[in-house]
């Protein structure tokens, strides 16, 4: 039987976002951080940018990078 992956199994989450951009930035980002997902990328189709967040991205020591 194959189990669903856990946070420890996931190296990177990538979202491609336009209509759910705010939700991805404000809701999913802290949820992934809380779950221990260390890297989260959002392909922001609204602004044609790649937003990348690295652990620990929920506090000021985290890394946020935006490339447009």
Image (cartoon, rainbow, N blue to C red):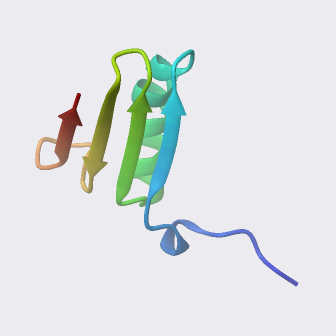
Q: Quadrant of the C terminus?
A: top left
Q: Quarter of the image for the N terminus: give it.
A: bottom right
Q: Position of residue 26 (x, y in %)?
A: 41, 25
Q: Quadrant of residue 5?
A: bottom right
**As drawn, 21 above or below 52:** above
Figure check: 5 above or below 50: below
From this view, report whether residue 25 is shown above or below residue 46. below
Image location (x, y in percent) of residue 64: 20, 41
Give the residue at x 11% y 49%: 61
Q: Quadrant of residue 52?
A: top left
* View extreme (left): residue: 61
Q: Is residue 50 left or right of residue 35?
A: left
Q: Residue at x 21, y 34 (%)?
A: 66
Q: Quadrant of residue 42?
A: top left
**Residue 29 pos. (x, y %):** 41, 38
66 sits to left or right of 18: left
**Residue in front for this viewpoint, 14 or 54:** 14
Q: Observer-nearest residue: 24 or 65?
A: 65
User: Could you tell me residue 27's position as x and y percent?
Assistant: 48, 29
């Amino acid at each position: 039987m194959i189990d669903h992956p856990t946070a420890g199994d996931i190296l990177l989450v990538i979202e491609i976002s336009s209509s759910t951009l705010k939700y991805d930035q404000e809701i999913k980002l802290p949820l992934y951080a809380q779950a221990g997902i260390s890297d989260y990328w959002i392909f922001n189709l609204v602004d044609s940018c790649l937003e990348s967040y690295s652990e620990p991205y929920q506090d000021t020591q985290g890394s946020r990078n935006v490339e447009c």
